Amino acid sequence: MNNDELLRRDLAVLWHPCTQMKDHESLPLIPIRRGEGVWLEDFDGNRYLDAISSWWVNLFGHANPSINQAIRDQLERLEHVILAGFGHQPAIELAERLVALTPQPLTRCFYTDNGSSAVEVALKMSFHYWRNHGQPRRTRFISLSGSYHGETLGALAVGDVALYKETYGPLLLEPIIVPSPDAWNREPGERAADVAERRFAAMEAALEQHSGEVCAVIVEPLVQCAGGMRMYDPVYLTRLREACDRHNVHLIADEIAVGFGRTGTLFACEQAGISPDFLCLSKGLTGGYLPLAAVLTSDDVYRAFYDDYTTLRAFLHSHSYTGNPLGCAAALATLDLFEQQPVLERNRQLAAHMGRAFAHLADHPHVGEVRQTGMILAAEMVRDKASREPYPWQERRGLTVYRHALERGALLRPLGNVVYLMPPYVITEAQIDRLAEVASAGITRATTD
Ligand code: PMP
């Protein structure tokens, strides 16, 4: 079996996600035979360094021996069981450990089976909480411009990335969108924290204006990932927590992408010293192995649903694969790795190295900014450096970087004009240096007219 043969068969039957399939008339589609550590290998034997952790899910490398073993062991015992009316050890143990790891007052864990469905659960639970408290007029959500929370209809509605959302607009709930604290929007002389403070006024105004109709504010803490790896200062979250308390609305932290050490702390909210009312986790939760998600919430929320059956106050949401035992086993093995190894410490060193390796790109005539939060680093290509005028999306400059990287054995998958790195934590400094070379040359190629 080789690439060509699989490619032909693939294109005959598959419909790939987030893809204009016609692109593959000219763009290589790459069938992967196996993975090991940071490497992916195709059927012709070419290797690609997975610099984006396969859509930000992989933490400890492909085919990680201890996660593999944990899944094998679980497989011998129980592959799956309905989680309504039944339970199992991995689901219980994982909930116990997540509750212990996450900040007070998160004491309850509700499982789903992907990130978008975790967001749906948080939105529905918040709405339903207020309804159970006799406030059914609360039906709205506040979110930030440039945010992304998934692509099922509810999650898509509270996001704000036009590419994914615009077409489906007529089907969606209408959120209240306030300007993001994204530090890219800083005025000359402003620091990231100043932008956050300045932008917070709009959040405060929205909370004031929509008092009594808002269920929750939903944010991606510190990094708006799919919106272009846009980053903001933690002070925004500190202020937001205080304002949500004052206005009596929930705070939903979508840490699906930034959780599990991506930003330098285990959870991004820790950097603001806050706890949300709902914490959505997925992606890295299973080390990048299996679809699983968890929504952590408080006893206060849990109690709002706890009553006699006939009051019909119970939370109604069910996915067939809720709390799948194999996924939970992979997640437990992932948490073991965090416990057994100095992961966050090592990440700090790797992050510092990433910063050094990519620093020179800040001087590139078509890079508007190199920004970084922990293990996420992004370089944004611009047409004009001084004004930060973007390249029109139709020019697809990022795609040139993507092609360039593939030819050189790296998987970089820019978001529009934003070239970024979100690598597995088992990457080495030498591999980071190599990625910096590939990214720089790719950016030069993509921006040379
Ligand atoms: N929220 C955030 C912040 C995400 O980055 C993503 C996935 N990119 C999601 C939600 C949706 O997760 P999933 O793709 O598992 O549905």
Image: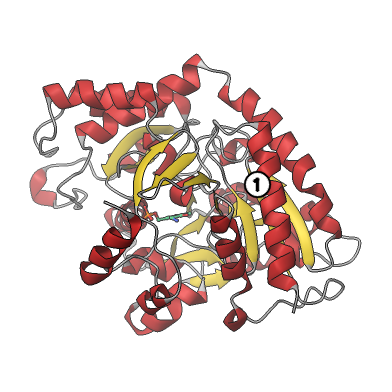
| Position of residue 12 measured from the top left corner of the image (x, y, whole percent) | 22, 71
Residue positioned most to the right: 189
Residue 59 appears in the rendering: yes
| Position of residue 186 measured from the top left corner of the image (x, y, whole percent) | 80, 64
Q: Residue at x 60, y 35 (%)?
A: 270
Q: Residue at x 20, y 31 (%)?
A: 325
| Position of residue 65 measured from the top left corner of the image (x, y, whole percent) | 37, 23
> 442 or 98, which is in the foreground?
442
Q: Is residue 200 left or right of residue 60?
A: right
Give above or below for 405 relative to 13: above
| Ligand 1: quadrant of the figure | bottom left
> 364 or 141, which is in the foreground?
364
**Mark 1 Cβ and ligand 1 under 8 Å apart:** no
Which residue corresponds to mark 1?
435
Dividing the picture into quadrants, the one containing residue 439 is bottom right
| Position of residue 352 measured from the top left corner of the image (x, y, whole percent) | 74, 35
Q: Residue at x 66, y 68 (%)?
A: 202
> 357 or 438, which is in the foreground?
438
Q: Residues within 10 Å of mark 1 (few under 14, many from 20)?
A: many
